[in-house]
């Protein structure tokens, strides 16, 4: 009996970080979410900051798949922008799940929680895609990686065109979508 070859799973991109509505980083987070959906990638987000939430909302609006890993244990969260909700009940320990859930991690702005996710992603060899030119911690990531080990590529972006090129360079987008 011939067994069909398994279909490769869609690649997953974690969106980490923070930026406030009205800022250039917030607008680019939304555009990145839409791009990720258009490219057929799965967006993974905690939706805990306005930037990660708008990325998820725009990905859903573009017909994409959004997995949201939330710190609480509440499966009944209302109005949460996602296709799949994973309530981990682990509080900030959820940051490890976020770091591991992506084939690569977008980093937008960021505060202490973002830094912890970035360091965990780095330790586990996940490529990092920091938004540059909009302020925040992600602006400094390429020049100041978590440590000297060069565990994974750090590929900055400042526009969705550059982000798409970086995703393609990582082999995460293979179609001509």
Image: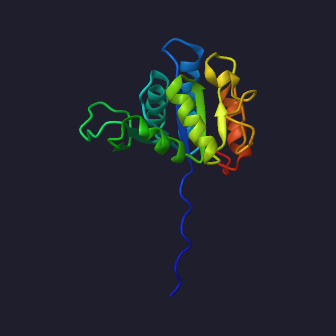
| Image spot of residue 10 (x, y percent) | 54, 53
Above or below, 55 against 12 in this view is: above
Q: Residue at x 47, y 45 (%)?
A: 97
Where residue 111 appears, as percent x and y from the top left, is: 53, 22
Residue 25 or residue 4, whichever sits in front: 25
Q: Write the residue at 58% across / 19% down.
A: 25
Q: Is 75 located above or below residue 61 in the figure?
A: below
- Residue 151 at x, y = what percent? 70, 45
Q: Is residue 98 above or below residue 78?
A: below
Locate residue 137: give its quadrant.
top right
Confirm whether residue 78 shows in the render. yes
Q: Name the outermost residue toward the top.
A: 22
- Could you say where residue 139 lies in the image, as x and y percent from the top left? 68, 22
Q: Give the quarter of the image for residue 149.
A: top right
Which of the 4 image quadrants contains residue 5? Answer: bottom right
Residue farthest toward the front in the current orientation of the protein: 148
Is 59 or 87 nearer to us in this picture? 87
Identify the residue at horizontal 48%, vertical 35% (top origin). 59
**Which residue is located at x 74 percent, y 42 percent?**
150
On the rendered structure, is 173 left or right of 67? right
In this picture, residue 117 sits left or right of residue 78: right
Quadrant that contains the C terminus: top right
Q: Residue furthest bottom?
A: 1
Choose between 54 and 89: the one closer to the eye.
89
Please name the colour scheme applied to the rendered image.
Answer: rainbow
- Residue 41 can be seen, yes or no: no
How many marks are shown on the rendered structure? 0
Task: List the single residue furthest toward the left.
Answer: 76
């Amino acid at each position: 009996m011939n067994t069909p070859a398994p279909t490769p799973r869609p690649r997953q991109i974690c969106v980490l970080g923070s930026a406030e509505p009205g800022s250039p980083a917030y607008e680019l987070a939304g555009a990145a979410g839409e791009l990720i959906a258009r490219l057929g990638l799965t967006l993974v987000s905690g939706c805990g900051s306005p930037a990660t939430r708008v990325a998820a909302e725009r990905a859903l609006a573009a017909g994409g798949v959004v997995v949201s890993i939330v710190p609480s244990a509440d499966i009944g969260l209302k109005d949460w922008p996602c296709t799949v909700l994973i309530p981990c009940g682990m509080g900030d320990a959820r940051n490890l799940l976020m770091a591991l859930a992506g084939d690569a991690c977008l980093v937008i702005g960021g505060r202490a929680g973002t830094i912890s996710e970035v360091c965990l992603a780095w330790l586990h060899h996940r490529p990092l895609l920091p938004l540059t030119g909009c302020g925040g911690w992600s602006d400094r990531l390429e020049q100041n990686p978590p440590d000297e080990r060069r565990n994974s590529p750090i590929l900055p972006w400042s526009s969705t065109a550059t982000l798409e090129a970086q995703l393609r360079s990582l082999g995460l987008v293979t179609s001509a979508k």
